[in-house]
Structure formats: structure tokens, C-alpha cells
Amino acid sequence: MENRIPTAPLVLGLAGLIPPLAGAAAVCFNLGHFGLIAREATLLYAALIASFLGGTWWSFASWVQRPSWWLLLASVVPSLAAWAMLLSLSALDAGTATAGLILVSLLVDWRLQRLGLAPPWWMKLRVPLSVTLAVALLVVTFGG
């Protein structure tokens, strides 16, 4: 099996890092009010990414004739967790918790790949994207 990340997922996945990296840069360069807006926008974007991950997991689950409850449950948890964190936690706590959620999501990704539901290159793509997003979240959370 081919283990190389296809060009389209690689390029589009990297493009998905533009918003959180821009937010981290705005905070690091102390761009005043724009830095505060960038922090909030980055937290919201990370919540969207968590929802997107859940959607990919739901898609993987639908490829099997009888999807398991754990996989279907896991696929709805990221969006619900991100929503709850943004509503109930301070920006500091929401940023830290969402970074943790993004990193923990790698465990589900790993399990999907082990089950043969995700493509063989999946973790090669997911790990750097998740780690970079988590670091950007921590930068906007603690840098502002």
C-alpha cells in the first residue's frame, strides 16, 4: 500500500493551518486589538476543525456495513466538546482544552488507521497538522 500523502490532502491540509498560524503571528507580534480578535477567531476555527475531524470519522464509520457504536460516538464528541468548551470556559481554559482535544483526537485517528478504515498515509498527515494546530492554539492562548 502507498504510504505517501497524496498531493491534494497535503496541500489542502497545510492550507488549513493558515488561519491558526496567522492568529498566532498576530498575538506574537502584539497587534493590539487585532491580536485579541485573532485569538477568538483561532479558538472558533479550532472548534470548527474539531467538528470537521468528527465528520471525517463519521465518514470512515459509514464505510463499514455495521459501524461500531464507539466510532459513531467518537465522531460526535469533538464538535460537542468544542462547543461546550467555548461556551463554558474562559478563553485561557478553552484554548488549552481545545488544544488537548485536538491532540487526543490523534488516538481516534490512530485507531481508525489500525482498523484499516483510514488511508495508510492518514497519520503522516494528521500528526503534523494536529500538533501545529495545538501549538498555535497554545500560542494564542498564552501569548496574549
Image (cartoon, helix red, strand yellow):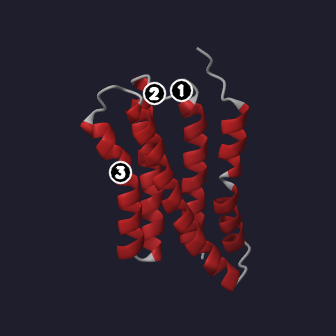
Q: Nearer the viewer, mark 2 or mark 3?
A: 3
Q: With respect to residue 69, does 136 lie above or below?
A: below
Q: Position of residue 37 (x, y in %)?
A: 62, 79
Q: Quadrant of the C terminus?
A: bottom right
Three-letter amino acid code at the position of disc 1: Pro
Give the distance between the C-alpha atoms of the residues marked 2 and 3, in whole angstroms. 18 Å
Which mark identifies residue 113?
A: 2
SS for dot 3: helix
Three-letter amino acid code at the position of disc 3: Val
Please tell me how crowded label 1 is: few (under 14), some (14-19), or many (20+) other residues with Cα within 10 Å.
Answer: some
Examine the rendering and report whether any part of residue 82 can be seen: yes
Q: Residue furthest top?
A: 1
Residues at discs 2 and 3 in contact (Cβ within 8 Å): no
Three-letter amino acid code at the position of disc 2: Gln
Residue drawn at the location 59% of the way across and 65% of the way down = 139
Give the distance between the C-alpha atoms of the residues marked 3 and 1, in whole angstroms. 21 Å
SS for dot 1: loop
**Where does label 3 land, which residue?**
76
Reading the chain from its start, which is encountered first: label 2 or label 1? 2
Q: With respect to residue 46, does 105 lie above or below?
A: above
Residues at discs 2 and 1 in contact (Cβ within 8 Å): yes
**Where does label 1 land, which residue?**
119
